[in-house]
Image: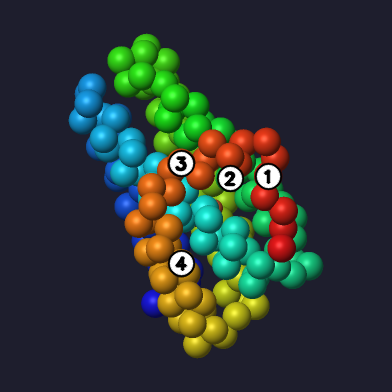
Amino acid sequence: MNAISMLIQQHRQMEEMFEAALKAEGKERAKLFAVVADALMSHVSIEEEHFYPVVRAKRTEDVLLESLEEHLSLKRVVADLLDLDVADPRYESKLHVLKEQAEHHHEEEEEKLFPRSKKLLADDELDELGDVMEEAQTKLLAAQPRELARAQTAAAAELK
Ligand SMILES: [Fe+2]
Ligand SMILES: [Fe+2]
C-alpha cells in the first residue's frame, strides 16, 4: 500500500478513535484510550523508523524536526494518561489535549510533509515503503506499543 495513503488513513481512524474515547466514560473510556494509544504509538514509531528517514532531504528537514518535537509532546501526554486513573478529573482534559495535538500534527504532516515527500519518491517506492511500514506496525501492535511512550519522554527522537 502507498505509504502516504496509509498514514493519512490512520490519521482519520485515530481522530475517530479519540472522539469515541472522549464520548465514553469510565472503564470503557480507558479501554478505548488503550486502543488509540497503541494505534498512535505504532504510527509514530513507523514514521520515525521508516518514513521520516526515507523522505529526509533539504526541503523536508525543517518540517521533520518539527514533527519529531510534536511526536515528543504526544508521547508525553500518552505517558501521563497511562499512569492516570480514568476517574481522575484531569483524565478527560488530558485526553482532549492529546486529541487536539494529534489533529494539529496530522494537519502539519498532510499539508507540509506529505506533499514535499511525494516529490521525492516515485509511486513504486511509496508502495514498497508502505509494505515495509505495514509489516513493522503489525509486529509493534502485537506487543502493546502504547507502553513505549513511557521510555520516550526525555527528548525528541533523532532525525535519522
Ligand atoms: Fe502521521
Ligand atoms: Fe507523525
Sooner in the amino-acid sequence: mark 1 or mark 2: 2
Instruction: Rate crowding at label 3 as few (under 14), some (14 to 19) or many (20 or more) other CA atoms within 10 Å.
Output: some
Q: Position of residue 39 (x, y in %)?
A: 38, 50
Instruction: Rate crowding at label 2 as few (under 14), some (14 to 19) or many (20 or more) other CA atoms within 10 Å.
Output: many
Q: Amino acid at mark 2?
A: His
Q: Which residue is mark 2?
A: 71
**Helix, strand or loop at mark 3:** helix
- Give the position of the C terminus as an image quadrant: bottom right
For the residues labelled 2 and 3, the Cα–Cα distance comes to 15 Å
Mark 3 C-beta closer than 8 Å to ligand 2: no
Mark 4 C-beta closer than 8 Å to ligand 1: no
Q: Which residue is mark 4?
A: 136
Count how many numbered circles sit on residues in the image.
Answer: 4
Q: Which mark is residue 156?
A: 1
For the residues labelled 4 and 3, the Cα–Cα distance comes to 16 Å
Q: Position of residue 100 (x, y in %)?
A: 46, 35
Residue 137 appears anywhere in the view: yes
Instruction: Rate crowding at label 1 as few (under 14), some (14 to 19) or many (20 or more) other CA atoms within 10 Å.
Output: some
